[in-house]
Structures are given as structure tokens and as C-alpha cells.
């Protein structure tokens, strides 16, 4: 640890040793201390809407099958056969009531329980030799969802997801809760970039400063109604517990007028008003801020923007979320999903999807220029000069740490956490402070898990959110009791 | 020699959930629906020669990033779609991500992409990539209309950026509907990428 103390101390001052973006020792430490503990996004419940639907997702190198069983419960099971360790599922998605290991034919129900073990009697002496009853694939150490977003923590003793997210859920709701029905999510697009995994989350969390420069071309071709990308400096940035993000300042108007301004239709605004709290509505209606990009520690980001999708003046919002999956200190796999309110009209869904494709994701015109920067940064961070350079991430702070712009009071910014108007790097600093805090904690123990305790399969997902799905779960639990 | 059953082999009809990838695409409602009739045309058939020449000429435009000229090779009602491939079990009946694509474009969205490259601020292509589109395995099919042809090809894109960055490759199969307006143009292109996880930093290129 000692050799990293200076790094953490510098990071906390807002001076970033450049090599942290391409260093194998720090990467190993990140795997050991961040991804062994933090809640990591793996998908959305709407990706597996039907009984038997599954997707396979990884946390670092650990592959999990995320299934919905016949009762509608969602589970995440480690994709490794109890016998010889073969992957029991080699597809990325599909529908199955059970998974059969191709090696020796052990098979498992989609709630994790072993249901088939060839020659159980002859080879093991039946239950006396190998207790098949109640044996399950290993469950993910911790599994929970918020507004349908599914997270895994590799720490069996992890704090509950809603406590982990903290006040960031106030902002997460804008993206994930636009009606009682919740989100319909499509994708992900997946691609690998030769960039360190921390750069994307930092950028989405608070980098309004890069928009006028990096994304000039997107403004020049008329994709945005606002003629100047530098409009971004009028927006507020906020940080609340595990996440933070950026906003745009909207023209004068009430809640409905401002929602219309970014392209929401009246029927959508009506549904939104039913689910956003009074303070969430005031942030838009009274304060005039519309959420844009955001990140949640360690590797989830969100984006909400409103481009034109055809000639004319009309703009239309889209929502996307993503996971920056670390592959190595200099490579990241991006998972990028498109999301839309499940109750939105079909025509709106189509146009919103088109807006997403044009702006973000593997072909998005914003994204293209971002990644070019991040690859270049990662390359430069590998050498010895990068060990001598501390990048200045102190924007928004005077030398004595006084903020350049005052924090916004609760009467002008109705969200929790700390917010300020104007260009600053407060959110990037907040993210890297969490990074340093996690790296200083001891690693989570990975001692062997006890098997054979799952007579009902492995424990299902815990929903921590307020969307109607939570009441559905309660119903299911009653049925199961 | 018969080439019956080629739809299955090529994969353009293996989308599951009924129909072609273009038909299933979220934004493919406007796309022309002409389809192939019969076996592939002999390689000395005039129509095959025309289609093959078209693809090779187009590849040179894409290599040179002559995108304004390239855009003129697309009909106004073009549908340009690249589904997201997913690994599924053999019997799953689908092999692309439902409701998601990398490209699902019409002429307007393609024109914005081209316009962006013509600004002085599209950093991802400044300095420009060195591109080579290798086009091979070309075969041509008639349709029910004389002025429409279906042409299939395999394509390998080599892309090199900077001096020492590792080059990236994209392999795909394509099915194009060509239509003769004052010249041959692409009215529908389905790009069937051969990777689920793309090993290229972005798709700021055309295939």
C-alpha cells in the first residue's frame, strides 16, 4: 500500500498522477478492492421479460447467468458447473428452463438447482455419496435491482444497494422512471476500446468542459437546436453519494413547457408527473435544469439528450445507460443500452432510438470523438514521463481550495448533494476520491462458499426501487410462502 | 450446379422472428422489399458483371473516404442496417439482438454522418484512418424487376490509425438491393457483422 499512498493523497488534492490510467499494479488493485466490493451494473430486468429468459453477463472475469424463472423471480448464478467447471451456458442470451453442461451432462434448473446428474447412483452411490438435493450453482454473492437496473456485488456482506447508491437515486430516477411501467431496454451494443476504464465514467460524470471542443462537429451539422455547444457552462453539475452528473439550463417556462422544450410529448409528461417527486419536478420546472450525462461509481454511466432526428426544428429525447467493463489497464469493453419508457407511443420509441443511434453507442457521432481522446490519453499514460506528470483536475477550485463558484442553495437547486453552476471538475474529483477510498480498503475475502443450501434454488434478486415491480415481488413472495 | 438453400447458408434469412434483418429492423419500415429470385447468376452474366463492378468501385470510394460521392450512390429511400450479432444456441431461432442495431439508417441520418466528416472537427478521423475495404465472394441474383438486383459479398475492412496503434479489422457479409435510377444505386444494404463484440474503437466508417 505504501507506494500508493502518495497517489491517493495527490488524487484527493485534485492532482492526478497520469500513470493511473495505464498501470498494471493499480489495475490489479482495482480488481481486488473495487470490483470485489462495489455494486456493478449488469443489465436491466426488461431484457429478460418472459419466464425462462436469460442473459449472460460478466463482472470482470466472472460469468453469471441472469435468469427469470417460472415464478418470475430473477436470479444470477455463476456460470461454472459444480463438477468440472465447464461453462453451463455458452450463449449470450436466450430462453431456457434448464442449462445442461456439455462436458458430462450435469444439468441445472434456471433457479440454480441441479436436476440431472448422469449415473448418480452408479457413480456416486446416490444421495449418500453426492447430495444432489438442494445443490445449486454458486449464486452471485449479492444481487439487487433499482428501478429495474440489475446490479451484482461480489461482496456477500455488501451494504444494501439502495444504501450504496444513496441520494444518487434522486437523479437515477430521471433516467429510469418515466412512468409506472418503468423502462424498456434494448441492446447492449458491445465493443472494445483501448482506453482505461476510469476515463469514461469521469467524462460522463462531469466533463461539460469538453463539449464545446470535442463535440463541435455535432453542433456544426445541425444535430442540436442550441447553436453553441458552450451553452453547457450555464448548466449545473451535482454530486450525491455514489454518483453525479451534468445538466443543461433550460429557457424560461414551467415544468410542462420545459419538458416540451426537450421534446417530451404531453402524454409522456402526464405519466412522468405521476412518478417524479415534487422536488424532482421542481429541479426542472422551478430551477430550470435538465439532466444530461451522469456516472455512478465505479463503472456505470447514463446519458439523456435531445437531438434532431430529421430536418426541421423538432428535437427528441433519448436515454442510454452503459457499463464500462475493465478488460486490462489499457482496454475496456463498453456495454451500451438504449432505454425508453415502456408506455411511450411506438412512434416516439422509434424516433428516440434513432436519436440514440445517431448520438451514442458504437456508431454514435458524439461517442466517436470521445473515444479517440481516451485511447490517446491511455497510450500516453503508459510511459515513464507519465509518472512524472500530475494532471490538473482542480477546475473550479482556487489554490486554497475555495470553490470558484458558490454551491447552489436548496431554493435554486432542489436535488440532494452538492451542486454548482459552471465549468468545474468537482465530479471527476468526487469519483476519484471514491476510487482512492476503495483502494485503501482491504480486499473482500473469497473463501469457499457452502453448497447445498438452496432447496428453493439460489436466493432471488432483491428489488430496492419504488417502481410497481416492487409490489409484484411482494405478491410473489406471498405465493411462495 | 444448384445453389438452392443459399438463404440459410448466407444467414440473411436466419434472423428468426420472421423475415429478413431489414424487415425486423426498428427503422426499416420505409425500406424497399424486393427479394431475390432463383439461383445466383453465372459469373459471365452481364448483370453480375455490373453488380460486381459497382461494389468494387464503391470500395475505392470508401477507402478514399470520398463520402459525398458515396452518398450519391444511395437511393433516397435507402435502408442501411447493421444488426447487433449475439451468440445464441443453435436452436434459438435468432442471432441478432432484438430491437437493437449498430446502424439502422436512412438517407438523412447517413447524410448527417457524412456532413460531420466534412467539418474540420471530426477528430476521430483527423488524422484520417488508412482504410482498405476488401470485397470478395460476390454473387448476384435477379429479382422480379429488371432494374433491381440483389448482390451479396463478403467484406473485410482493415483500419489503421496513427503510427504504432494496432490495426483493427471488421469482417462482415453484405446483402445489397441495387436499383437502376439514372445509374445503379444501393436501395437497401444489410451488413452482417461477424463479431458480437466489435474490436474497433468505433464505427466511424462505412461498410
Image (cartoon, coloured by chain):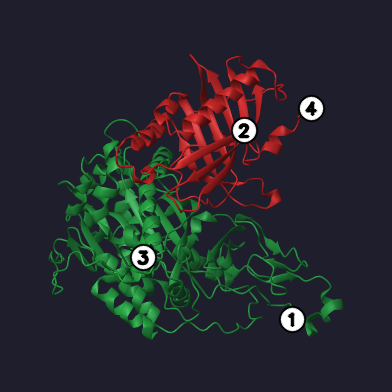
Q: Is there CB contact under 8 Å for labels 1 and 3?
A: no
Q: Chain of mark 2?
A: B
Tell me the colour chain B is drawn in.
red
Determine whether label 1 and label 4 are within 8 Å by CB.
no
Q: Which residue is mark 3?
A: A296
Q: CA distance from mark 2 to mark 3?
A: 43 Å
Q: Which residue is mark 2?
A: B153
Q: In the image, which is nearer the foreground, mark 2 or mark 4?
A: 2
Looking at the image, residue A345 sits to the left or right of residue A138; the answer is left
On residue B2, the disc is 4
Q: Residues within 10 Å of mark 1 (few under 14, many from 20)?
A: some
Q: Are marks 1 and 2 on the same chain?
A: no
Chain to which mark 4 belongs: B
Q: Which residue is mark 1?
A: A131
Mark 2 is surrounded, within 10 Å at the Cα level, by few (under 14), some (14 to 19) or many (20 or more) other residues, namely many
Q: Quadrant of residue B54?
A: top right
Q: Are marks 2 and 3 on the same chain?
A: no
Q: Secondary structure at mark 2?
A: strand
Amino acid at each position: 500500500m505504501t507506494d500508493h499512498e502518495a497517489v491517493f493523497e495527490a488524487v484527493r488534492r485534485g492532482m492526478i498522477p497520469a500513470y493511473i490510467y495505464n498501470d498494471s499494479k493499480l489495475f490489479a488493485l482495482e480488481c481486488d478492492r473495487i470490483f470485489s466490493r462495489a455494486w456493478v451494473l449488469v443489465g436491466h430486468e426488461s431484457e429478460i421479460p418472459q419466464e425462462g429468459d436469460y442473459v449472460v453477463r460478466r463482472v470482470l472475469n466472472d460469468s453469471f447467468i441472469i435468469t427469470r424463472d417460472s415464478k418470475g423471480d430473477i436470479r444470477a448464478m455463476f456460470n461454472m458447473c459444480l463438477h468440472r467447471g465447464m461453462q453451463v451456458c455458452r450463449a449470450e442470451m436466450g430462453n431456457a428452463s434448464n442449462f445442461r453442461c456439455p462436458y458430462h451432462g450435469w444439468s441445472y434448473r434456471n433457479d440454480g438447482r441441479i436436476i440431472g446428474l448422469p449415473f448418480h447412483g452408479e457413480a456416486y452411490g446416490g444421495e449418500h455419496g453426492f447430495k444432489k438435493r438442494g445443490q445449486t450453482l454458486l449464486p452471485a454473492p449479492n444481487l439487487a435491482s433499482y428501478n429495474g437496473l440489475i446490479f451484482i456485488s461480489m461482496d456477500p456482506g455488501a451494504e444494501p444497494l439502495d444504501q450504496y447508491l444513496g441520494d444518487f437515486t434522486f437523479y437515477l430516477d430521471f433516467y429510469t422512471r418515466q412512468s409506472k411501467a418503468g423502462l424498456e431496454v434494448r441492446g447492449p451494443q458491445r465493443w472494445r476500446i483501448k482506453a482505461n476504464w476510469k476515463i469514461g465514467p469521469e467524462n460522463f460524470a462531469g466533463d461539460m468542459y469538453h463539449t464545446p471542443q470535442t463535440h463541435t462537429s455535432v453542433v456544426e451539422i445541425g444535430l442540436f437546436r442550441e447553436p453553441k455547444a458552450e451553452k453547457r457552462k450555464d448548466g449545473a453539475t451535482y454530486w450525491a453519494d455514489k454518483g453525479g452528473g451534468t445538466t443543461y439550463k433550460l429557457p424560461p417556462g414551467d415544468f410542462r413547457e420545459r419538458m416540451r422544450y426537450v421534446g417530451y410529448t404531453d402524454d409522456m409528461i402526464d405519466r412522468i408527473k405521476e412518478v417524479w417527486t415534487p422536488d424532482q419536478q421542481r429541479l426542472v420546472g422551478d430551477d430550470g435544469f435538465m439532466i444530461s450525462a451522469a456516472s455512478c461509481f465505479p463503472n456505470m454511466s447514463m446519458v439523456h439528450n435531445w437531438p434532431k432526428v430529421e430536418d426541421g426544428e423538432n428535437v427528441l429525447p433519448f436515454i442510454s445507460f452503459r457499463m464500462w467493463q475493465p478488460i486490462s489497464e489499457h482496454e475496456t469493453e463498453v456495454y451500451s443500452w438504449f432505454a425508453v419508457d415502456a408506455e411511450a407511443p411506438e412512434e416516439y420509441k422509434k424516433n428516440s432510438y434513432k436519436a440514440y443511434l445517431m448520438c451514442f453507442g458504437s456508431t454514435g457521432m458524439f461517442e466517436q470523438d470521445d473515444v479517440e481522446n481516451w485511447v490517446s490519453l491511455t497510450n500516453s499514460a503508459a510511459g515513464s514521463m507519465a509518472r512524472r506528470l500530475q494532471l490538473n483536475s482542480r477546475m473550479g477550485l482556487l489554490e486554497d481550495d475555495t470553490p470558484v463558484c458558490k454551491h447552489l442553495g436548496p431554493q435554486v437547486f432542489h436535488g440532494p448533494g452538492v451542486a454548482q453552476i459552471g465549468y468545474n471538475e468537482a465530479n471527476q474529483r468526487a469519483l476519484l476520491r471514491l476510487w482512492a477510498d476503495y483502494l485503501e480498503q482491504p480486499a473482500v475475502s473469497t473463501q469457499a462458499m457452502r453448497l447445498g443450501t438452496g432447496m428453493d434454488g439460489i436466493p432471488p434478486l432483491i428489488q430496492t426501487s419504488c417502481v410497481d415491480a416492487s409490489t409484484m415481488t411482494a405478491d410473489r413472495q406471498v405465493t411462495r410462502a | 450446379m444448384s445453389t438452392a438453400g443459399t438463404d440459410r447458408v448466407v444467414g440473411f434469412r436466419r434472423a428468426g422472428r420472421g423475415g429478413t434483418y431489414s424487415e425486423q429492423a426498428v427503422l426499416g419500415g420505409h425500406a424497399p422489399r424486393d427479394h431475390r429470385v432463383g439461383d445466383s447468376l453465372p459469373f459471365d452474366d452481364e448483370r453480375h458483371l455490373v453488380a460486381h463492378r459497382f461494389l468494387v468501385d464503391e470500395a475505392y470510394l470508401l477507402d478514399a473516404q470520398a463520402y459525398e460521392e458515396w452518398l450519391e450512390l444511395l437511393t433516397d429511400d435507402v435502408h442501411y442496417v447493421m444488426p447487433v450479432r449475439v451468440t445464441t444456441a443453435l436452436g434459438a431461432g435468432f442471432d441478432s439482438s432484438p430491437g437493437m442495431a449498430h446502424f439502422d439508417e436512412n438517407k438523412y441520418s447517413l447524410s448527417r454522418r457524412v456532413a460531420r466528416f466534412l467539418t474540420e472537427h471530426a477528430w476521430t478521423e483527423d488524422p484520417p484512418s488508412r482504410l482498405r475495404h476488401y470485397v470478395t465472394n460476390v454473387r448476384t441474383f435477379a429479382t422480379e424487376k429488371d432494374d433491381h438486383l440483389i448482390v451479396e459479398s463478403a467484406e473485410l475492412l482493415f483500419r489503421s490509425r496513427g503510427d504504432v496503434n494496432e490495426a483493427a479489422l471488421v469482417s462482415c457479409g453484405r446483402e445489397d438491393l441495387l436499383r437502376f435510377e439514372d445509374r445503379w444505386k444501393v436501395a437497401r444494404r444489410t451488413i452482417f457483422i461477424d463479431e458480437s463484440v466489435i474490436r474497433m474503437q468505433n464505427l466511424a466508417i462505412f461498410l
